[in-house]
Amino acid sequence: MRVTGRIPRPLLHALAALLVACGGTTGRAPVPTATTSTIEAHATAAPAAPGGTVASTAAIPTEALPVARFTMPDGREARLPVEVIGAAEFSIGLSGRTSLEGRGMLFYWPGGNSQSGFWMKDTHIPLDIAFVDAGLSVITIVQMEAESLEIHRPDAPYLAAVEAPLGWYAAHGIEAGARVTWEFDPVALGAGQ
């Protein structure tokens, strides 16, 4: 379903509640907010796999993935191979996975002012998520419990969200304030499109 234009707040909330109550989207779609002018719900966007529906990027070997580099003010760095998905697969994200094998996933909004939230419906492993602002700084890092319907979002608009295995950011000393460098061109790879 695709709804475009301004949606009155009560209708937006009713649609979001209906999606959740009916099993709505597959995976963890960014959850619409009152400021969202477009709601997209995709029942399926990738073929079913033994672990459930997974994003089309799941089959890419980890060593072949593009890399996001996180740099702390003191110079510490960590590199995370990331699956880069288009907006049509946001609702799938990392759902259906039982492990990540040292990889993450990039959710990217070319406009740089997303306020969408994330949930963990049909996501079988706990994750960390780093929200990145338009200046390419990490705003916050949040831990997300597997299968949870709790909605997670930062207090400020953001450009990107980078999901990683639970504890990955802490294990690499990455915190809010880290700078992010895409060692690839997100737009050229179809991120968020």
Image (cartoon, rainbow, N blue to C red):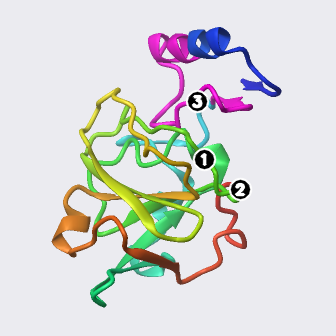
Q: Residue at x 23, y 65 (%)?
A: 168
Counting from the top left corner in percent of width and height, residue 189 is at 67, 70
User: What is the x, y in percent for residue 98?
Assistant: 27, 48
For marks 2 and 3, the one nearer the N-term is 3
Q: Which residues are magenta?
A: 16-41
Residue 174 vs 28, above or below: the answer is below
Find disc 3 in the rendering and name its residue.
Answer: 32
Q: Secondary structure at mark 1?
A: loop
At 38% across and 42% down in the image, what residue appears?
96
**Residue type, label 1:** Ser
| Figure check: 94 above or below 8 | below
Q: Dot 3: what SS?
A: loop
76 w.r.t. 93: above or below: below
Look at mark 2 in the image and give the residue it sits on: 111
Q: Main secondary structure of the magenta part?
A: loop
Q: CA distance from mark 3 to mark 1?
A: 10 Å
- The answer to whether 158 appears left or right of 142 in the picture is right
Crowding at label 2, few (<14), some or many (≥20) Cα neighbours within 10 Å?
few
Q: How many marks?
A: 3
| Distance from the alpha carbon under mark 1 to that under mark 2 | 8 Å
| Residue drawn at (47%, 17%) of the image | 20
Q: Secondary structure at mark 2?
A: loop
Residue 131 circle label: none
Kind of residue sitting beneath label 3? Pro
Tell me the residue at 47%/62% (across/down).
59
At which x and y percent is residue 157? 56, 49
Location of residue 87 in the rendering, given as x and y in whole percent from the top left corner: 65, 48
Mark-to-mark CA distance, 2 and 3? 16 Å
Residue that mark 1 sits on = 114
